[in-house]
Every structure is written in structure tokens, then in C-alpha cells.
Amino acid sequence: MRAAIIDIGSTTMKLAIGEQDGDDIKILESLVSTIDIGRDTFYQGRIARQEINQIIDILEKYRLIINQYEVTDVKVIATTAVREAENNNLFLDTIYRKTGYTIEILNVGDVVFYIDSYLSQKLKKFYPLHEKNLIIAEIGSGSLDISIMEKGYIVTNMGIPAGTLRLKQFKNQIDGTQEESDTALEEFIESQLSRIRFISPKIKIDDIILIDETYSKHLQNLLPKKSRASNFFQFSRREVNRLKEKVKNERLDEIGFQYKIPPHIADTLDGYAMILDRLLTLVKNKYCYILETSLSEAILGNLIFGREISAKYSKSLQLISAARFICQKFNSNLKHTKAVAKISEELFGYFKDILGLQEESLIYLILAAYMHNVGLFISNRAYHKHAEYIINSMQMFRLTQREMKMIACIARYHRKATPQRSHPLYASMDPHEQMLIQKLSSILRIAHSLDNSQKQKIKNMEVQYGKNQDISLILYTQDSFALEKSIFAQTKYLFEELSGSKINLIIKKIS
């Protein structure tokens, strides 16, 4: 299979064409063009017209090469510089009208997904990826994208505004001596990376894997005693210190000239060295692993290998892993939230047809079920409202902000009032989304009621339909179910209104 990826970055625009070569990818064509939209976005907040025209010209040149290789599976992506531009909608529309290419703007979760899933394919013979707790980092011009993995599952991901171009811009704004500028830059990087310790204090990180194709290829020349046999190698703290000293004591433009490093790379070597130095403080090991690859190659891997990539990297499994970590972070009762999620999933299977639900909406229900209690971290009064704004403020793996709003609303309505147009977040959704929120929250309300004691009393469950599509929900338990039955009677009415069916609870005791 053959595929092509066009990556519109902050300082470069890349074309990679590849095909499967056994368990690896053979790159047939790799081109890089210099662009400057990062400077436009990070300084002025908008992509300039001349840059848009330049990108259109480059896309047309790339199209000719793609056609020569007879590639039909083509993906065009953009990252931080386009994502943060105020006029990115105009940019996307203009590119589509002029070239026919639809650009997918990747958020941090998307970048993490492609890189992490490709690592499982790329390193399966060299490194026990699914046996370690890892920080996986990708240094770009606009951001430092980081994921924390616990034995193959995503705990959390974040985009830190500490890309190498951004760091250079930050340093240029410092009013002080060279030494003061270096100190300010180092402190800025340290303050940004401190978020990792705050987010995952209970996870002991085994290793750091850095994804880097821009700088790593020059390290062997910059550090003459550095040798490596492959594109996956260790980089020690001692070597990082040597690199820091080199870029501190020599002019960056002279380093670039001496070692034939392109100016836009040489000019940001100091920021790169400082990021490596700060990353190494997060682990006890005196080195990190560097994999010389790129986001483009990772996406090519996803396009070419597809289903062969580890099942652990399915979107739903990774989202559930992240949701469980969020429960732990906010001290939620994980046994209860897992039980509510399990009951919600079973009820969804029984009721999706009667409510007119599609299978793809199940993940919203499961995530809301896991996180419905996070508001208790703030207060036990109106905690469903606290849960709404906590979830709404989050970014999760490969979910849009719109999807997070829906999950926040579903979680809010697990108790108390049902969705109302007077509620601002719910009112901001379109009619289709509002109806989906009502349907999924009606299931969550029932699921929550059935574990209201938080004692996981249900051993088995089944559903029977009677006359007029009335529903009998039959539960098997060894325990008293009086509390749950009372709460169920108070919360079932939304489901009955939406489904048009009465639902009755039948409790069967088992020994």
C-alpha cells in the first residue's frame, strides 16, 4: 500500500510519500519547503495573505509529485500555527477553493494518537513500550506535545507552548544581558514542564522517549564522541550538558555555518538543549531515548498499517484510560464510577434502538459516567454543576471542544434537574446535540440510581418488553435494593418521556 502526507508546520511544509516494506515504511519521496506562518501566528495572531499564496503554490507542486507516484490516499494536516491563527477558517476555505485539498487541523490529542500508536509498531522489536510508564514528547516549532503513558494506555496529554520557535521569540523579548536572557528562558521552560509533575504525581515515570527528526540528525556532528547505530538511541545527561555548553559559549549562526545546519534550526538549538535538560529532571535515569522520526511518518504508518497497529490504541480504550485517571486525580470513587459506566453501557445496548441512538455516541455516555462525580472535589453541594464546568474545561484525547461540552452536559444531568434551555452550556448546543444529551443523560440517570449506595449490588441484568412496549428491567442481587429502587422511581421519568415507554424495576434475590 502507498500513501502520502503533507504536513503544514510552523516553519516548514513537508511532503512524505511511503509504502509498506515488511514491518516498516519505505519512504519513496521526502520534500521540505520553508514557510513562515509560525512567525505570523505567534507574533500577529493571523496567517498573512502572502503565506497563504505561498502554501497554495507549494501544494500544487506537491500534487504533481504525488500524481507521478500514482498515490490516491493523501492526507493534508496542520498543527499549532494554523490551529492558533485567528483566521484559520479563512485559511482552510481558501486552500480548499484553490486546490481542492481539505486540511485537517490536529489538536494535541490527535498528534499524540498518531505518534503513540506508530511507536507501538515501530519499536515492537526494540523496546517494551507496553511494559513501561513513559513520557513521550514531540518537539515542534510551536509547541511541545507530551503524553504520559501507563503501560501502553494514555493517562493524559498536553500541549505546552514551548516549541523552539516560540522559545526564540520569547528570548528575543527579554530585556537584559545574554546571561539574563538564558536564565529567563530556562526558568520559563521549567515552569511550563512543572505542570507534568502536578498532573501525574502518583505515576513513576520509567523513561522519556523524544520524537525528533529536526535536531537529532545533527547531534552526532555537534558532539563528535556521540555515535549511534540506528535512529533509536540513548542521549545522556552528560551529552545534554555538553550540548548546552556548546550553544551557550558559541554563536548559534557560527555553529550552523560550521556544521552545515540550516539557519532556522541552528538558531533554536539553545531552546532545544534546555528542553532536553528539563525533561531529564522528570526521571531518575540519566538519559532519554530519541527516536529519529516525524509526525508525518507516524501518520503514514497509520494510513499504511491501519488495523495492524496495536488494539490498545483504539480511540475508545484510550479515552476510557484517560477518564479513569481523571477520576483518580479528583479523588472520585473509582469502583462506583466503573460500576455506573458498566451499567450505562449495558443499558445503552438495550435501549439504543428505542431511543434512536447510534453506536458512536456510546463513548460520550461512558465518559460522562466515569466523570459524573468529579464535582465532589469542589463541594458536595450542587456537585453535578461543578462536574459540568470541570469537564467543559478539559481537553481529552482526540475529542473536539464541542464533544467535551456534550459530555459535560450529560454528566451534569445524572441527577437533579433535567436539561433546560435556561442552562447556558446546554442552550449553546444545537437542537440535534441537545436531543442527544437528553437521551444519553436519561440512561445515565438510571445507571446512577442503580448504584446509588455505591456498593455495586447488581450481579446480573436483563430487559423484557411487554404490552405497549412497556419495559421490565430485571436485576439480580443478593442485597437490599430499597434505596436504589426509591432513587430509580425519582429519576426514570426523563427516559419514559423520551422513549414513550414505561419502565418498571423487578428485583430478584439470588443466594
Image (cartoon, rainbow, N blue to C red):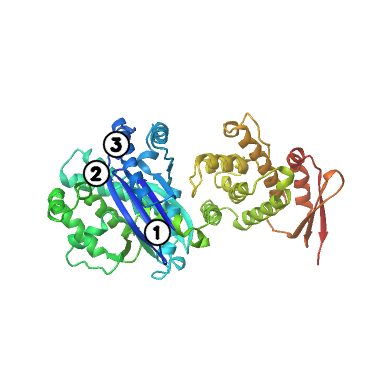
Left or right: residue 41 compared with residue 322: left
Of residues 396 and 179, the one nearer the viewer is 396
Q: CA distance from mark 3 to mark 1?
A: 28 Å
- What secondary structure is marked by label 2? helix
Q: Are marks 3 and 1 in contact (CB under 8 Å)?
A: no
Residue 130 location in percent, x, y? Answer: 46, 66
Residue designated by label 3: 54
| The N terminus sits in image quarter | bottom left
For marks 2 and 1, the one nearer the N-term is: 1
Residue density around tag 3, few if under 14, some if 14–19, many if 20 or more, within 10 Å? few
Disc assigned to residue 19: 1
User: What amino acid does circle 1 point to?
Assistant: Glu
User: What amino acid does circle 3 point to?
Assistant: Gln
Point out the frontmost of discs 3 and 1.
Answer: 1
Residue 376 location in percent, x, y? Answer: 58, 46
For marks 2 and 3, the one nearer the N-term is: 3
- What secondary structure is marked by label 3? helix
Q: CA distance from mark 2 to mark 1?
A: 36 Å
